[in-house]
Every structure is written in C-alpha cells, then in structure tokens.
C-alpha cells in the first residue's frame, strides 16, 4: 500500500481547525466530570472563547503565507482560506459570548453546546481550505451536522424541533444535490480534485456538455442552499426563527461566509479556464441569482413584524449583495470591454481587478459577520423565555421605547440596523461601497442600480426597528431580562467594530486585499 | 500654508462632534449643563467658522484652507477638505445658525434633552463636513450621515405625524442619493487620471475635462460618435445617466418640483430646531450639490437637460406660491414658500449667467436666514399656543407688539422688499435669467412668484397679527423674553446688513460664480470656453509625488478679468 508521506507543512495550515476541535473535545470531556453537587459551567464559555481566539490569532498570523497545496492536493492553504478562518473565528467568538448569557438565562448551558459550536467552526475552517469534492463534502457535513444539532438545542417547544428537522431535511437534500453534481463532474472528467478539474474541463465540455453543465449546475445549487440564495432560501426564515438566537447568528455569519468561500473556490477556475463565453454564462447565471435574491429577500423582509424573521430575510438579501460580488468576480476574466472600461485592460490588470473583487467579498463578509452577530446579540439580550411559546419574543413591540429603558442596547441595535441598511458612517456602508464598486467595474451597472434600489427598500424595515426603539413609548409592564455581561461585551465589541471599521476601514481592507489570493490564481 | 490654516476646517467640522462626546458623558438629568455645553460648542464653532470665512481670500485660489490626508488609499479615497467661495459662505450660514438653534430649543425641548443636543451636534458636524468635502466619497458619507440625526430630530421631537414624516424624509433622500452612489462609482471607472483612479474631486474634474470639451463640441456640431476618443465616447454614452442620477439626488434635497412632497410633511412635523436646520442648511446641500458636482462634472449633459430643469424650477416657484395661498397651517405655508424660494436658486443657477449664479448663491444664504428666522419666530408662537392654524390666531400685534415687529421685518425679507437681503438675491436671479438663453416666459413666470409671495405672506401676517384679538386664549400671551430676543436679533441684524451692504458677501461669491458659469458653459460646444481656463488646482496627497495632473496655476488668470456688475465687464453668456 502506498502510504502518503505527510509532513508538518501539511498540518500547519489546519492548526486553527485542530485547535477548535481540541477545544470541543476538552469541553466534552470536562462536562463528563461535572457532578450534580458541584456543578459549575462558568468556565465553559471562557474555554470556548479562548480556543476561538487562539485559533483566530494563529490563522491571522499565518494568513499571508504563500499559497500551496496540502494533503496531496486535497486541500489548499492560501491567504483566502486564512482570511475566511479568521472571519469564522470572529463569528465564533462573538456568538460564544452571546450564547453564554442566553443559555444561562434558560438554564440550558452545557459543554456540548460549545463543543458543537467549535466543531462547526472547525468544519467551516476546513471547508474554506477544501480543494477536492469529497473533502469538501465531508467538511460541509461536519459543519452542517453540528448546526443541525445546535438549531434544535432548546428541545422544549415546537419551534426548535421544527427548525432542526427542517434544516436537517433540507440540508441533507442540498448536500445530496451537491454530491450528485460532483459525481456527474467526476463522470465527465474522471477527477474530484479541483486543481485537476480545471484543466480537464474544456475537453469534458466538448465531449460531454450535458453531463458537465448539469454537474456544475447541481454543485452550484447545493451551495446556493447553504448561502440561502433565492429560490433556495425557503428554509431560512423558519430555521433562523426556531434556532436559538446565537445559533441563528452563527448560521447567518459563519455558515454563509464559508459557503461563499467554497462557491468562489469551486467556480473561479471554471470561469478562468473555460474561456470568455463560459465566464459570461456564469456571470449571467449568478447575476440572475443575485438579482432574484436581493429583490425577493428585501421584499419578503418588508412586511415582517417579527424581528428575528426580518433578520432572516435580511440575511437572504445580504446573500444577494454578496452574489453580486461573485457575479462581478466571474465577469472579469472575459478580458473584454465592460461598458465603462474606457481603455482595454492592461495585462495583469485583470488579475488585480479580480483580487479587488475578492477583497470586496471578504470585506463584505466581515462587515456582515460583525453586524449580524451584533443584531442577533441585541435580540438575544432582549428576548424573554416566557414569550417564546407564544412566538412574541421577537415582536417589534418588544423594541418599543427601548431607548428609554436600555439606552446602550438601543444604541447598539440602531448602529447594527444602520449598518445593515448601508448608511455611513458604518461598516455596512463601506461593504456596500466596495461590492458595488466591484460590480460597476465588472460592467454590471444595471445590476448595481437594482442592488441600490433593493437596499433602499431594505432601509425601510431596518429603520422601523429604530422607530420603535426611539420614537414609540414603551408598553406598560414590559420587563427586559437581566443584564448578562457576556452579551453586553459582545454588543460593545460589535458596535465598536461597526463604527470604527466604518470610519477607518483602511488598514483592515488593505490586509484583506493582500489576503485575497486564491491558490488557483 | 500654516498648520493652523490647513487644519482650521478640521476643527470647524469636528469640534461639534468632540463636544458631542463630552455631552454624552454628562448625566441626562443635568439639562441646563447639557444646553450650556452645546451652546458653547456652537459658539466656539461659530467663531472658528467666522475665522475661516474671513481667512477666505476672494482673489486667491479656488479652493482655500485645503488639506488632504490619506484615508482609504487603495481605492483612491482621501480625506480632502477645502472651501470655495460658495462653500465658505454656506459654512458661515451653518455655524451662524448653530447657536441660534440651540437657543431656540432652550425651553421648546424638555424631553430627552441629552439625546436632542447630541443629535444637533452630530448633525452640525455632518453638514459642515459635506460643505467642506473635496473628495466625492467623503462628501457622500457626510451627505448621507446627516440624514440620521435629522431623521431622529423629526421623528423623536416632532409633532403628531412625526414618524411618517421622518420615514418619508429619509427614504426620499436615500433613494436619490443611492442612485448617485452608483453614478459616482461609474465616474470613478470612466475617469483614468494619470496618478491612478481617484475619488478626489479636482482630480476627477480635470480628468474629465478634455472629454467634456470633445463631447460638447460633438453635440453642438452633430458629429459621429465613432470619431470620439474612448473616454469621450464613454462620457457621451453614460454622462446623461450619471448627470440624471446626481440631479435626482440633489433635486430631492432642494427640493425641486415634483419630488418636493416630503418637505411640507417634514417641516410641519419637525420641532423648531429641525425646521430651522432643514430650511437653513440641509436644503442648501441640494443646491450646493448641483453647483459643485452635477453641473461642473457633466456640463454637456446638463446643457441637454438645462431647459427641462429650469422649467421645473419655474413650476416650483409658481406652484409653491399657489400652494401657500391655499394653506391654513402656518408651518405648511412656510414650507411651501421654501419650495418657491429654492426654485429661484435653481433657476438662477441654470441661467448660466454670472448674475444668475451669484443671485442663486445669495438666495441660498437669504433663504437660510429668512426662513430660519420665520421658523424660529413661529416656534415661539407655537410654544405659547400649540396650534399651527391661522384661524387660531388674530390680533397678536396687540398682545405681542415686539414679536410682531420682528415677524414683520422677517416677512419683508422673505418677500424681497428692497433694503432687505431677499431683494438682492431675487433681483439678481431674475436679472440673470432675463439675460440668459432660457425662454423669456421663464423669467416672466418667475417674476409672478415674487408677487404671489408678497400676497401669501402679507395675507398670513394680516390674519395672524392684525385686527382685533378674536380668541380669549390669545389675550394673555406674553411678549418675547430676553432669551428669545437674543435668538432672534442676530437674524434681524443679518437681514438688514445683507440687504444694505451686500458687497462683502458678494465678493466671496463672485469668483465662485464666475468659475461656475465658465464650467457650465463648457457644456455648450459653441461657447468658446477652453478647457485650460476652467481646470482645477489639484492638491497632491501628503507624502506622494506630485504626479496627479497637470496644473497650470492655482489661480485662474483667464477668469480674473470677469467681475460681476463692474462696468465694461462682459460675463460669459451662453447663446444657443
């Protein structure tokens, strides 16, 4: 048997994921030794936080190393995967902080919860590095199975089980579609490695177009389920609403970010190597998906009076803006004249433009991660256990007069809403500026116009929350849950990030620009 | 330039924000301290703003007190600030209104005092930033950021229908400006300056110049688009769309008929401070945007849409005045009078004559002063009676003689009686539009607006102030107190000074309007304005080589000869 020789160089890039997994195991083991008499779980969230922070720091320190293949080409370590891992760790850390207070309030804090969060994080980090369909599938499942379990964590009541079940069925379905698509591609090309796939595709398209197109299409659909792109978004509102709020936050941030990372990783070589016609086709396909997602997401969010559902639809809408970036990414390699490109692109300018588009996507993902975590965090701070069975825990009315009762929370939530709406000086504006800039650069001007109009509609429902917080009197007898310092810390951190990155995005966006390098480029 | 000069505008912009941080630390119960701290902030900012205004040398280069710091280098965004004559004048107006707004709300606002003053201070910073920005993205950021505090001012401290009005205000403005954002991005990619892509306003302007000239000549002679250079071809294809996106954003803000419908609602519902700032400064950001961005960047497209926009301005003048005649609500009347008055600003600008442009700029200042004063004075009345209906007043002159005197003087300013500031502005606008290439009907119709204006204002004054005291509630009204007089007196002084001695103010506006007219005339291929004449000085980014763009000199020698209203001077006119 041919035993592959793996060295430290193979393991070093997966160190963040290993750290997260070790953290999960530590939590699982120590949970076993808790006895009913001396029960103390305060350490658990801190352990989870520490492991995510260390993993994030390790990932950040090694992000800018040159891209290379690891594990015989089944994975790649490139700056892009490093940046996604950092992003995942930021999301994990914030959602651990929000979870601690949330679970304590419900008496549901267990080591397994944090362990599942960390395992999901490990899956996400590895997914961002996967460069082969089977590896990609396994890591996708590591991430997904953990999130299925997490979304049904609060077992009592109908909503969590409905959410978990729905997520599981649809998730399994989408994974099956993805695997089927990958198998068709394997049939057409004879390989599952993305690095080899790209070279074999032109021949496969020529000899077996049906199989190749169907395979690629199904892989795209499988990933579109994970990013919640319309029309594959049906599960999003119910699952987000039913899952524990910190888990919804992680789903909207981490799961989405990594799904976008694999979307880019799988499809960019297609656009690069199949010639301008196919790149054009992919641009149109993703542009259509983006348009549909932006419009439907925003329109569906408009009538929601349940803030959690509104945030779910808003996360669909934000997937649309990100898809706009993805479409722009594929549009570049046509090398031709965008309607606004006055002079023909210089040699190398193409690559620079693509790098800037990737940077825009990464920046937007980061902006959305902190904003989404912050808004779900404020929601988690506010929701009361008693209201959950009746489904009124997330009603807009709960925000009425919040600025009087809890000025700090109201301020944080207002900053998040403005950032989601893309109003300066918040990070959401900078994210939108970068994404729309990339879209205009790629010649997708009309799509950018549709995007800004959709986001103007979005501002209506985000501002409605601000209206309730600042302009409506609070209802009589409404109490808010007691303060949890961990949740408040998460709110402070995300609010600071939203404002500071909105005012001075320079350093971070420059770093992300350097990190916007894929192995396949 | 000294360190003090180059950072003076930063101080003016960010001082209110700094004080906002201070006010945020004060306990919410200390209402008096909060009010005093805010007033001090506004007064100090006023002194700095006045200093900036006085330091502005009319004979000097176009942009003064300039500073450019790096912000987001990789995308060509820099924190570039500086003022031209118009911006300096509007800056003075803004810092002038600041302390008066605080004084006007001294007793008017008694709930959530801390948040109210925070919103005022943040708003002040945002508006000053938008006026001083010389980078398009920086302008956009401040322009948009000013929406949030104003939205809160209307929505939290407004009257009954405040939430609807605040939302309407926000969404109207936002839709317009988001389309402008796409146009800004398009512009960024169309222009390829030598030093790399940039959002820097002078760099973008100079980068477009040669193509602009080409396009205007092409439009004038009806040439074949295929002979144009790539940049000019792109500008010809996309310029009109970009201009329309810019124009929509600013037309909503001005507000130009038919996108004015948010204004009456916002004004009626806003608290007195909100109305004063809205009328005084925020609407000017719209006219300022036309002046600074929409017209100079796309003169060829502006030329194409010149008559329709001027027509909308005239319709606004007449329609606003007619709506005023039909109002029973005093605040709504003042709001519609704003639509009418700002129609003059737009008409004067689109006349493309130096008189028209200067009149338009002067009218911006006038409207800020006179409408600001009207809202302030009516706020005092509203505080006493809590009704906006004319029918609820009558004979107020008998119980509040001093107040009536103030109100009547401000009314005279608003209807442009000679000797007040309003006269100078409206006269110049009408003169300018008369001399311009616009149809004569426009000037005639606009002139009827002056007559209608006198009718509705005097009619309102008569109903509210003269005659017998008809209602018992009005008999015991107290006349103005010391604080109220102190808040209203500066307005009165400015009305008289700007009416009798307009020259110091006009001196600072003239160079700006000459440059504006020359730049606008570039859109007409037959005007004979050369691109070299209207080039802007570019400030290099600190610490970077001066490779941005060729700059002839910091002063436009070619324009130095053109002086307004001096015998023998021939203003550049646009002939069709």
Image: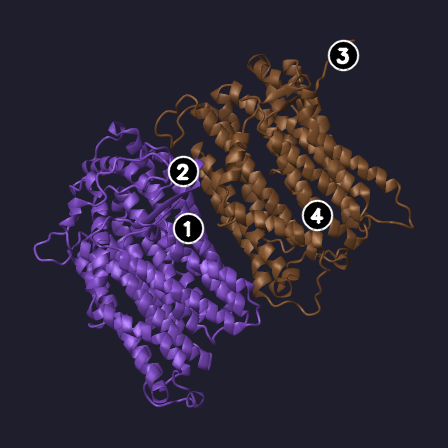
Chain colours: A brown, B purple
What residue is at 34 percent from the left and 35 percent from the top?
A: B191
Mark 2 element type: loop
Q: Are marks 3 and 2 in contact (CB under 8 Å)?
A: no
- Do marks 4 and 2 both belong to one polypeptide chain? no
Comes first in the chain, label 3 or label 4: 3
Q: Nearer the viewer, residue A68 or B412?
A: A68
Residue where numbered disc 4 is placed: A97
Q: Position of residue B213 (x, y in %)?
A: 23, 37
Residue where numbered disc 2 is placed: B76
Mark pair 1, 2: CA separation: 24 Å
Q: Are marks 4 and 2 in contact (CB under 8 Å)?
A: no
Mark pair 4, 2: CA separation: 37 Å
- Do marks 3 and 4 both belong to one polypeptide chain? yes
Comes first in the chain, label 1 or label 2: 2
Q: Which mark is residue A3?
A: 3
Q: Which mark is residue B176?
A: 1
Mark 1 element type: helix
Residue B168: tell me if it is visible.
Answer: no
Q: Chain of mark 1?
A: B
Snapshot quadrant of residue B93:
bottom left
Q: Position of residue B20 (x, y in %)?
A: 49, 61
Left or right, B334 with respect to B500, comes to: right
Q: Nearer the viewer, residue A26 or A289?
A: A26
Left or right, B13 with respect to A214, comes to: left
Mark 3 element type: loop
Q: Are marks 1 and 2 in contact (CB under 8 Å)?
A: no
Mark pair 1, 4: CA separation: 39 Å
Left or right, B374 with respect to A252, comes to: left
- Do marks 3 and 2 both belong to one polypeptide chain? no
Q: Chain of mark 2?
A: B
Left or right, A516 with respect to B42, comes to: right
What residue is at 60 percent from the left and 14 percent from the top?
A: A208
């Amino acid at each position: 048997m041919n035993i592959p020789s793996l060295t430290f160089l193979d393991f070093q890039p997966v160190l963040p994921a290993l750290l997260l997994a070790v953290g999960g195991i530590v939590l699982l083991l120590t949970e076993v030794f808790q006895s009913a008499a001396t029960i103390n779980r305060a350490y658990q969230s801190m352990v989870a936080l520490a492991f995510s922070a260390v993993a994030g720091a390790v990932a950040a320190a090694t992000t800018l190393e040159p891209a290379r293949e690891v594990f015989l080409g089944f994975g790649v370590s490139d700056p892009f995967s490093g940046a996604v891992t950092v992003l995942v760790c930021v999301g994990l850390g914030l959602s651990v902080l929000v979870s601690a207070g949330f679970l304590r309030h419900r008496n549901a804090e267990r080591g397994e919860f944090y362990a599942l969060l960390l395992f999901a994080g490990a899956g996400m980090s590895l997914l961002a590095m996967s460069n082969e369909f089977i590896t990609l599938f396994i890591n996708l499942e590591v991430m997904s199975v953990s999130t299925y379990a997490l979304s049904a964590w609060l077992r009592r009541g109908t909503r969590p089980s409905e959410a978990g079940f729905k997520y599981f069925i649809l998730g399994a379905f989408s994974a099956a579609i993805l695997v089927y698509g990958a198998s068709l591609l394997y049939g057409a090309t004879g390989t599952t490695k993305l690095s080899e796939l790209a070279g074999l595709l032109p021949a496969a398209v020529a000899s077996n177009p049906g199989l190749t197109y169907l395979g690629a299409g199904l892989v795209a659909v499988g990933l579109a389920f994970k990013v919640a792109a319309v029309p594959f978004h049906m599960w999003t509102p119910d699952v987000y609403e039913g899952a524990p709020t910190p888990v919804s936050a992680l789903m909207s941030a981490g799961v989405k970010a990594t799904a976008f990372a694999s979307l880019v990783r799988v499809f960019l070589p297609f656009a690069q190597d199949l010639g301008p016609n196919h790149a054009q086709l992919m641009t149109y396909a993703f542009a259509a998906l983006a348009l549909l997602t932006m419009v439907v997401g925003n329109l569906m969010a408009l009538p929601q009076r349940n803030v959690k559902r509104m945030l779910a639809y808003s996360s669909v809408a934000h997937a649309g803006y990100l898809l706009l970036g993805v479409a722009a990414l594929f549009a570049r390699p046509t090398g031709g004249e965008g309607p606004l490109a006055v002079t023909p692109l210089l040699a190398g300018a193409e690559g620079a433009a693509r790098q800037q588009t990737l940077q825009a996507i990464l920046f937007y993902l980061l902006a959305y991660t902190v904003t989404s975590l912050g808004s779900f965090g404020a929601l988690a701070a506010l929701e009361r256990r008693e209201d959950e069975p009746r489904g009124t825990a997330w009603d807009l009315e709960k925000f009425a007069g919040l600025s009087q009762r809890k000025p700090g929370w109201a301020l944080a939530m207002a900053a998040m809403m403005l950032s989601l709406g893309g109003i300066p000086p918040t990070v959401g504006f900078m994210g939108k500026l970068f994404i729309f800039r990339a879209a205009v650069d790629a010649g997708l001007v009309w799509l950018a116009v549709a995007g800004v109009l959709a986001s103007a509609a979005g501002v209506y429902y985000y501002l409605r929350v601000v209206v309730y917080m600042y302009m409506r009197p609070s209802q009589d007898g409404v109490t808010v849950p007691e303060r949890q310092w961990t949740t408040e810390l998460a709110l402070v951190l995300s609010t600071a990030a939203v404002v500071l990155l909105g005012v001075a995005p320079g350093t971070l966006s420059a770093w992300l620009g350097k990190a916007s390098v894929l192995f396949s480029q | 330039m000294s360190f003090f000069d180059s950072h003076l505008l930063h101080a003016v912009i960010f001082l209110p924000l700094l004080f906002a941080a201070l006010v945020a630390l004060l306990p919410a119960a200390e209402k008096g301290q909060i009010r005093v701290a805010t007033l001090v902030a506004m007064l100090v900012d006023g002194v700095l703003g006045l200093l900036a205004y006085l330091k502005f040398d009319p004979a000097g280069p176009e942009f003064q007190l300039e500073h450019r710091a790096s912000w987001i280098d990789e995308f060509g965004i820099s924190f570039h600030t500086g003022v031209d004559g118009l911006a300096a004048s509007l800056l003075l107006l803004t810092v002038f209104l600041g302390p008066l707004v605080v004084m006007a709300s001294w007793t008017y606002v008694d709930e959530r005092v801390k948040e109210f003053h925070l919103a005022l201070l943040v708003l002040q910073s945002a508006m000053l930033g938008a006026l001083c920005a010389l980078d398009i993205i920086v302008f956009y950021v401040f322009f948009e950021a000013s929406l949030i505090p104003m939205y809160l001012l209307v929505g939290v401290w407004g009257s009954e229908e405040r939430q609807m009005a605040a939302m309407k205000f926000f969404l109207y403005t936002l839709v317009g400006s988001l389309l402008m954002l796409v146009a800004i991005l398009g512009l960024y990619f169309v222009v390829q300056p030598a030093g790399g892509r940039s959002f820097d306003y002078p760099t973008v302007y100079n980068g477009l110049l040669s193509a602009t000239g080409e396009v205007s000549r092409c439009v004038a002679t009806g040439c074949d688009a295929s002979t144009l250079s790539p940049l000019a071809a792109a500008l010809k294809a996309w310029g009109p769309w970009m201009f329309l996106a810019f124009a929509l954003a600013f037309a909503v803000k001005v507000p130009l008929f038919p996108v004015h419908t948010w204004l009456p609602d916002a004004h009626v519902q806003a608290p007195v401070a909100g109305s004063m700032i809205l009328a005084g400064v925020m609407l000017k950001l719209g006219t300022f945007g036309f002046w600074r961005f929409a017209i100079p960047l796309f003169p060829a497209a502006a030329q194409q849409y010149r008559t329709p926009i001027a027509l909308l301005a005239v319709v606004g003048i007449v329609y606003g005045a007619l709506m005023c005649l039909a109002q029973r609500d005093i605040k709504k009347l003042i709001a519609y009078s704003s639509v009418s008055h700002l129609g003059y600003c737009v008409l004067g600008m689109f006349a493309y004559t130096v008189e028209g442009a200067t009149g338009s700029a002067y009218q911006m200042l006038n409207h800020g002063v006179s409408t600001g004063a009207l809202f302030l004075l009516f706020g005092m009345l509203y505080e006493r009676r809590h009704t906006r209906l004319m029918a609820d007043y009558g004979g107020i002159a008998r119980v509040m003689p001093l107040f009536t005197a103030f109100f009547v003087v401000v009314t005279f300013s608003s209807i442009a009686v000679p000797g007040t500031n309003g006269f100078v502005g409206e006269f110049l606008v009408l003169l300018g539009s008369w001399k311009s290439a616009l149809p004569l009907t426009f000037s005639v119709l606009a002139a009827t607006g002056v007559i209608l204006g006198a009718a509705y204002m005097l009619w309102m004054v008569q109903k509210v102030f003269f005659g017998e005291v008809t209602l018992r509630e009005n008999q015991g009204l107290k006349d103005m107190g010391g604080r109220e007089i102190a808040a209203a007196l500066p307005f009165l002084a400015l009305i008289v000074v700007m009416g009798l001695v307009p020259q110091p103010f006009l001196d600072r506006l003239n160079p700006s309007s000459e440059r504006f007219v020359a730049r606008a005339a570039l859109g007409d291929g037959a005007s004979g304005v050369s691109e070299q004449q209207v080039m802007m000085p570019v400030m290099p980014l600190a610490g970077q080589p001066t490779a941005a763009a060729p700059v002839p000199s910091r002063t436009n020698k070619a324009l130095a000869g053109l002086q307004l209203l001096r015998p023998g001077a021939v203003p550049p006119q646009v002939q069709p």
